[in-house]
Image: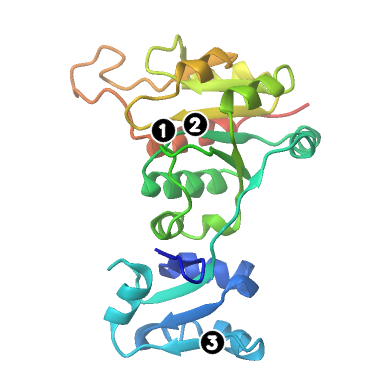
Amino acid sequence: MKNKQFKELAVCGVEAVKALGNKNPDSITRFYYNTEHAPMFGSLCHYLAEKHIPYNCVKSDTELEKLCGSVHHQGVVAMIPQPVLHEVCLADISDWMRNKEHIILLDRVGNANNLGAIVRSAVFFGIKNLIIPTDEAQSSITTSSYRVAQGGMEYIRLFKVSSLPELLESVKNKFIRIGTDLRAKNDVADLVHIAEKKSVFLVLGNEEHGISQQVKNKCDFLIKINGKSSSGGKDTDVESLNVAQAAAVLAYEMSKIKYL
């Protein structure tokens, strides 16, 4: 939940707040918790007290619900400044090339929970960079995406870009550009071979429509994840995975890529 008056964002959920307190405690502007979680966050409260940052043990969980706009606060809410994403620049691309890093791009992934789950999977499999477009159809960083990421927001580098096709064109021949498509000829099992020991720009598409044709046209390869239905089996009628589930599978395969 955003506080427009103070330009703050509520971070809730035990794992999300623990990671925030461990990694970026100075970003916390206010902190609230219930009596059940007081012992768990004693060290953080001590740190905030030294920095003269307000914190408070609330009498009722209703207060936490009001702060974060959700019943899923898990007993803790930390307020932080509304995140401002950095626009991808040539220096970032050069750093990724030098460090042989993979990048995930989201093409209008609209569900905040999916964004959070993608961040969680990316971090789990060692992918440090995620780019989202400045498009109204793309979910921004929200309270729910922070909670679902389970602390991953503190370990991912989030960027924004005004045009995914232009960005993909700018990294041509520098990275392997891979998009996801249900009708692709290549399977996810081919990803390691396709990457040829190079860093990958992986594009994940909108929950309903997938990646746009403009973005597909800029990809070197398109891949799909075959299930029982897509491979001709009769055990299930589900055509595809949720984009967050697909992200976990693809991130795992990307983690297998070995460099020279």
Q: Residue 57, percent across and down?
A: 41, 89
Residue 67's image quarter?
bottom left
Q: Which residue is mark 1?
A: 246
One can see residue 255 in this view = no
Residue drawn where x is 37% and y is 20% of the image: 226
Q: Residue 52, percent across and down?
A: 62, 89
Q: Are marks 1 and 2 in contact (CB under 8 Å)?
A: yes
Tell me the CA gap for discs 1 and 3: 41 Å
Q: Residue 191, percent across and down?
A: 55, 21
Residue type beneath disc 2: Leu
Q: Which residue is mark 2?
A: 250
Q: Using the image as rendered, state which of residue 9 and residue 45 is in the foreground.
A: 9
Q: Nearer the viewer, mark 2 or mark 3?
A: 3
Residue 230 in the figure: left or right of residue 256: left
Q: Is residue 231 above or below residue 167?
A: above
Which secondary structure lies at badge 3?
A: loop
Q: Earlier in the sequence, mark 1 or mark 3?
A: 3
